[in-house]
């Protein structure tokens, strides 16, 4: 069956240091996978949606593990490409609750960065209900940028809504390059899910209303700004909504933004109004930060509903 949501990008191998161990001194690591788009894909699949992901992985243990993990989560990887000449990228990081997390990327010359226009199945995208992308893919290489633009054009030509999370990574490019890459993509996004600081960088504006106004003028129908520990704020240009962050013990904040996206998009696809979608997004993000790893804490729909129910009881 055609996926409800299609996303794409680089999925890497992840080596996560033992909890609380600084990366420089860590001796034990747990192997998993990482990637903003695949995190969101798994989050949506666990919440009961049909999801497709495509990208390139190497013909190596990390690549095979990535595809096997995504298939096991119910994600359609039938359009993924196994590159026999380039390796799967690798991410190595530590996890701390109360101090900066150190992240090392080994993705230069990776299979994921070699994504190209020919890897984009336009017909597949045209049959989906939503295309979700992040700015990371466009920043990987010129070929990946061209593939991103082709995927977005395919969605727009078929009338498929597009959601965009800028997901700026300073280790990939300087801010001027990010602005150059992301401004054209914002012109094709129906829904923008961005950190406030990212949106301010892209727009050159300051504050929620001015920044969201700039994005709405470029064609977005709804802008959701993630405010970190303060919560999230959204507007469609006429109405505004605020959602406080879930009050939970944070163990590992990495992946919270991707989880928020999954929670919001799930509710959005099910026709839930913005206040309810924000509540579900905060709940899903709150579930992830309580457990080490990018996607280990992603809940299924039953656990999400239980957590949302508890949140509503507490609010009363």
Image (spheres, rainbow, N blue to C red):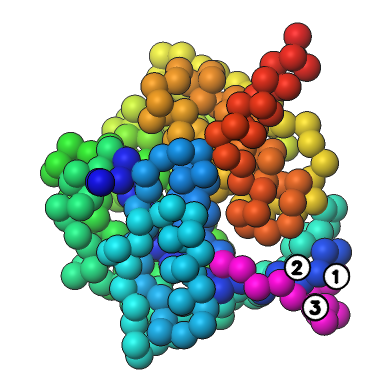
Q: Are marks 1 and 2 in contact (CB under 8 Å)?
A: yes
How many numbered markers are drawn? 3
How far, Cα to Cα, is label 1 from label 2?
7 Å
Q: Where 196 sits versus 88, above or below? A: above
Residue 7 spot, x, y in % from top left: 36, 53
For the C terminus, the quadrant is: top right
Give the secondary structure at mark 1.
Answer: loop
Residue on which disc 1 sits: 21
Is residue 278 visible in the rendered image? The answer is: yes
| Label ID, residue 94 | 2
Which element type, helix, strand or loop, lies under badge 3?
A: loop
Residues at marks 3 and 1 touching, judged by CB atoms closer than 8 Å: yes
User: In the image, residue 118 lies at what x, y percent?
Assistant: 19, 70
Q: Quadrant of residue 143?
A: bottom left
Task: Identify the secondary structure beneath mark 2.
Answer: loop
Q: Position of residue 226 (x, y in %)?
A: 58, 37
Looking at marks 2 and 3 on the same chain, the residue that comes earlier in the sequence is marked by: 3
The residues tagged by marks 2 and 3 sit, at their Cα atoms, a distance apart of 10 Å
Q: What residue range appears in magenta?
A: 21-33
Q: Nearer the viewer, residue 106 or 87?
A: 87
User: Residue 184 — which label?
Assistant: none
- Mark 3 vs mark 1: which is more N-terminal? 1
Q: Nearer the viewer, residue 138 or 201?
A: 138
Q: Which mark is residue 28?
A: 3
Residue 176 in percent (x, y) is at 45, 61
Q: Residue at x 86, y 64 (%)?
A: 20
Q: Determine the residue positioned at 18% across, 46% down.
A: 126
């Amino acid at each position: 069956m055609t996926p409800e949501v299609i996303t794409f990008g680089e999925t890497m191998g992840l080596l996560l240091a033992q909890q609380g161990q600084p990366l420089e001194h860590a001796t034990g690591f747990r192997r998993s996978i990482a990637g903003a788009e695949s995190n969101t894909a798994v989050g949506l699949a666990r919440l009961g949606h049909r999801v497709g992901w495509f990208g390139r992985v190497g013909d190596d243990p990390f690549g095979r593990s990535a595809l096997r993990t995504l298939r096991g989560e119910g994600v359609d990887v039938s359009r993924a490409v196994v590159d026999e000449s380039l390796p799967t990228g690798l991410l190595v990081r530590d996890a701390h609750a109360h101090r900066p997390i150190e992240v090392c990327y080994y993705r230069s010359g990776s299979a994921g960065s070699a994504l190209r226009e020919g890897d984009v199945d336009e017909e597949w995208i045209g049959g989906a209900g939503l295309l979700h992308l992040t700015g990371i893919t466009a920043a990987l290489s010129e070929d990946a940028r061209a593939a991103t633009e082709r995927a977005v054009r395919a969605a727009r030509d078929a009338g498929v809504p597009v959601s965009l999370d800028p997901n700026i990574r300073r280790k990939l490019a300087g801010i001027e390059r990010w602005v150059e890459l992301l401004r054209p993509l914002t012109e094709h996004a129906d829904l923008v899910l961005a950190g406030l600081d990212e949106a301010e960088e892209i727009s050159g504006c300051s504050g929620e209303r001015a920044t969201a106004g700039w994005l709405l003028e470029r064609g977005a129908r709804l802008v959701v700004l993630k405010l970190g520990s303060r919560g999230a704020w959204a507007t469609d240009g006429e109405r505004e909504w605020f959602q406080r962050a879930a009050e939970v013990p944070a163990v590992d904040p990495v992946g919270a933004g991707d989880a928020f996206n999954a929670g919001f998009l799930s509710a959005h696809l099910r026709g839930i109004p913005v206040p309810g979608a924000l509540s579900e997004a905060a709940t899903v993000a709150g579930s992830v930060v309580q457990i080490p790893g990018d996607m280990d804490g992603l809940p299924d729909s039953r656990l999400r509903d239980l957590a949302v129910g508890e949140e509503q009881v507490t609010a009363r």
